[in-house]
Amino acid sequence: IEMQPHAIFYSPFNAVQKIPAVLSTIPVIPFLDYMESDPLGRAEWIKFTAVFFGREKQADSIFNGIKTQYLKLKALAQNVKNRPTVFSGKYYNGQWYVPGGDSYFARIFKDAGGNYLWKDIPKQSSFPLDFEAVFKKAQDADFWRITGTFNVTPSYDELAGENQLYTKFNAFKEHHIIYCDPEKTAYFETSPLAPQIILADFIKAFHPELLPEYHPGYYKILP
């Protein structure tokens, strides 16, 4: 505010969130890319940003490159015979928030040749379940996706120390946890414009033979 910007972009917590009174003299522009459940739809918000800087042609070029790479990778995994099962998230404060079947990650998992266990739930947002419900459905799943930061080097021992029940999942036993540290990867800052990298990361995890020379950008198998 002291810098007197011409405008402020912000991500509202919900659609009816009120703007603080202190911003009443500065135009505020809601940036709602995070509400897109289509990975390419989220990346396409670069075009919205570009309008404010007169960079529409550059934004179109960048987005077209992202789209081309994403669709090429999607086609690579489209006809895989084996689709490993996958689930997502962690238990926190008595609840486990599970992405709906129409969510961003449900689409990424499908496009990467995975079988998301809650794919049939017609929700774009995450919804809460108790631990028992998740365990019943996901205990034998092949892969487990986690995003988060540990105070120490992430490991299976750290996860076990957090919740001993995690060790009962097959994905834990087989060391098939797909992990992203947002602090070390700038995941929250850069990934909305890199769905092709996230997709490649999961293809590498689910079907490493399809991308033998690829090095993950955000998500990788926790060793």
Image: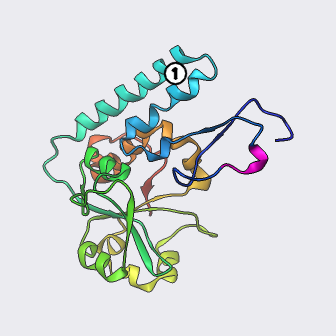
Question: Which residue is at a point 13% across and 49% down the rendered structure image?
Answer: 81
> From what the image shows, is residue 64 above or below residue 11?
above
Location of the C terminus by quadrant is bottom left
What amino acid type is highlighted by mark number 1?
A: Ala
> From what the image shows, is residue 136 above or below residue 113?
below
Q: Please, which residue is most extreme toward the top here?
A: 57
Residue 22 part of the magenta-drawn span: yes
Q: Position of residue 69 (x, y in %)?
A: 36, 29
Question: Which residue is at a point 43% across and 77% down the rendered structure image?
Answer: 95
Residue that carries the numbered disc 1 in the rendered image: 59
Q: Please, which residue is most extreme toward the bottom here?
A: 164
The range drawn in magenta is: 19-23
Residue 76 part of the magenta-drawn span: no
Q: Position of residue 221 (x, y in %)?
A: 41, 58
Location of the N terminus by quadrant is top right
Q: Is residue 177 visible?
A: no
Task: Place residue 129 in its image quadrant.
Answer: bottom left
Which is the main secondary structure of the residues drawn in magenta? helix
